[in-house]
Amino acid sequence: VNVAPALTNATATASPEIICSGANAQLTAASGIIGENTPSNYCIPTVGFTGATADYISNVSFADINNSSGDDPADYTDYTSIQIANVTAGVPTTISLTSGGSQTFSVWIDYNQDGVFQSTERVAATTTSSTSASGPITIPVTAFNGQTRMRVGCRYSSAITAAQACGHTGWGEYEDYSVNISGATDKPTYTYS
């Protein structure tokens, strides 16, 4: 049973805003529930040392994604509008990562589409440095169907913790991708009257 959350930030907008008696206006309402329609803005990850350091992600391969990239001076690139992986819940899908230098890797997927990478949403990680890593990711059936975000991070020398989806203090890089999930749970909808 899903209990409808309280509407604390609900808004409604009429278009046009001013009408004559007997005319019609379209009312657009938003519940104010974070992530109900689209996720809130994701954090922009940071690293302690930016620039061309050879500590970068050189390739991400996951389902329909096969993206090669160089050392971005900002050490963060958003590929969500051009790189989308279509995955099915319960089916293991291999992710393969390579880097410009020896790195540790972490991967998060925002399963509940709330715009936050929770520590529990880290789906893959390495603890020793290497120039490549691969392994299966299985989307749980409790994830929400539809498009969400995946974040890949790398770090020189030290492992990235599950809580470091928004940044770490070392050398490295982050990249974001879109993941379209099917075969999982439909996101709940609420009706208010």
Image: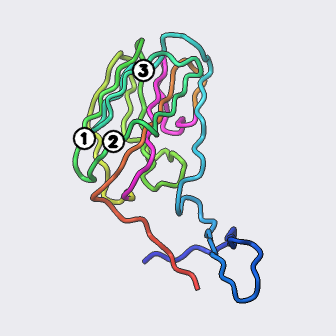
Q: Which residue is mark 3?
A: 69
Label 2–label 1 contact, CB within 8 A:
yes
**Which residues make up the magenta segment?**
145-166
Task: Please name whichever residue, 46 or 157, is drawn nearer the observer in this view of the structure.
Answer: 46
Q: Residue at x 24, y 52 (%)?
A: 90
Query: How far apart, in angstroms, are the residues tagged by discs 2 and 1?
Result: 10 Å
Q: Earlier in the sequence, mark 3 or mark 1?
A: 3
Q: Position of residue 100 (x, y in %)?
A: 41, 13
- Against 68, residue 186 (above or below) is below
In the rendered structure, are the residues bearing label 3 and label 2 in contact, judged by CB atoms less than 8 Å apart? no
In the rendered image, residue 126, in percent from the top left (x then y), is placed at 37, 28
Viewer-nearest of labels 3 and 1? 3
Q: What residue is pinned by disc 1?
A: 93
Q: Earlier in the sequence, mark 2 or mark 1?
A: 2
Relative placement, left or right, of 7 versus 162 is: right
Instruction: Identify which amino acid the numbered label 2 is placed on.
Output: Ala
Residue labelled with disc 2: 85
Position of the N terminus, as image quadrant, is bottom left
Q: Amino acid at mark 3?
A: Ser
